[in-house]
Amino acid sequence: MLLREKFWLWGHPEGWYNNSYGNTKASRMTPMEACLYLGITNTFMVPDGDHVNVQVNRRQYNKSFKTLQHVGWEFGHAFQDANGDTSGVDLFLEDAKEFPNISCVVFDDFIVRKGFQASIEETNQFHEKFRNNDVKRLDTWMVLYTKEYGLDEAADQAMMPYLAAFDGIIMWTWEEKDVHLIPEKFERLKKLAPGKRFMFGCYLWNFGEHKEATAEAVKWQLDWYRERILAGEAEGVVFHTNTMADLDYESYDAAVAWMEEHGDEEIPD
C-alpha cells in the first residue's frame, strides 16, 4: 500500500468558504479536483450548512468520485434533526448500494451539536443500523477537537461511552497556535478511547484564527502524522479542504510538495 492511500479530503461544495473565516478570495475547485491536485484517493463529502446557498446533488458528486478508493458522507446534520428516528440512515445505505466505494459516514462536530443531550442509547441506535443492515456495513467516524477533552476529568469520563460508540475518531486541532499540543492530546485520546481507530485532521487554512495556515505547521503535522501511521497508531490523515486549494496559499503548496515527496512510500497494509 502507498502512503497516499491513507489520505482523505474533507470535501465541501465548491465555493463553500468564499469570503468567510478571513478568506477574501473566490475558489472554484471541486472535491474531486482537489483529490487529484493533492494526489489522494479518498474523500469525506460534507454538504450541510446554511452559510452557502447551494443545493447538493448527492448523485452527481458520487458519480464524480467514481475513481476514488473510499468515499464517506457526513451524517451529523441529519442525526441532529432525527430525534431518534433511524430512517434517515436509509438514504445513505441507498447511495452505498449504488456506489460501491461509499464505505463510511462521518459525524461532524458531534460533541458541539449533540453533546450529551442525546442518550447513549439513541446514539447507538444509529450506529447499529449503519453496522447491521441489508446493504453493507458503513463504518462510523466521529470528529473530535483537541479543545473538547483533556481539560476536565469528569467531562472526559462522561464522554467515553460516546467515543466507544464509534468505529473511529478523527482528531482535529482548531487553532494553529495549539498544534504543539497534538502529541499530548493524542496520548490522552488513546486512553479515553482504547482500541479505537484514529485519523488526524490537518487544516490547510487556520479557521480558528481566521487567517492563513503556515507551511511550517502543515509540514510539522504531516511529518508527525506519518510517524504515527508507520507505527500503526493511526490509519490516516484528512486534509481540510478543497475550497481554498486553488488560491495560492502556502499551506496548500506545502501539502502538495509533502505528498509528492512521501505519497509513494510503500507502507504495510
Image: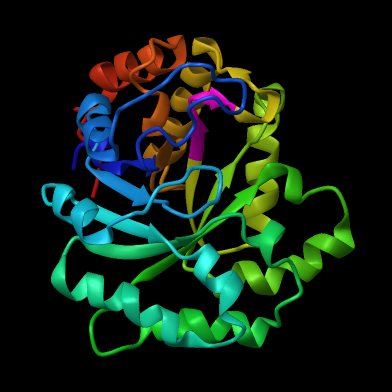
Left or right? Give the position of 85 relative to 89: right
Q: Residue at x 19, y 54 (%)?
A: 60
Q: Is residue 137 visible?
A: no
The image's colouring method is rainbow
Number of residue marks: 0
Q: Nearer the viewer, residue 132 or 2?
A: 132
Residue located farthest toward the left when viewing the structure as drawn: 67
| Residue placed most toward the observer, 37 or 190 | 37
Q: Which residues are magenta?
A: 201-206
Please identify the dominant SS of the magenta region.
Answer: strand
Residue drawn at point x = 65 percent, y = 52 percent? 189
Give the residue displayed 24% in from the left and 41% down from the top: 5
Residue lying furthest front in this view?
Answer: 53
Quarter holding the N terminus is top left
Q: Where 133 sits versus 153, above or below?
A: below
- Where in the figure is residue 165, as x and y percent of width and height? 57, 74
Quarter of the image where one finds residue 6:
top left
In magenta stretch: residue 229: no
Does residue 76 appear to the left or right of 260 in the view shown? Answer: right
Residue situated in front as seen by the camera: 262 or 122: 122
Compared to residue 80, the image places residue 225 above or below, namely above
Query: In this rendering, does residue 120 appear at all?
Result: yes
Counting from the top left corner in percent of width and height, residue 76 is at 53, 64
Query: Where does the image place residue 123, in percent across and percent down from the top left?
Result: 59, 79
User: Looking at the image, is 269 positioned above or below residue 250?
Assistant: below
Q: Residue at x 64, y 87 (%)?
A: 121
- Residue 155 position, x and y percent, is 84, 62
Q: Is residue 259 above or below residue 239?
A: above
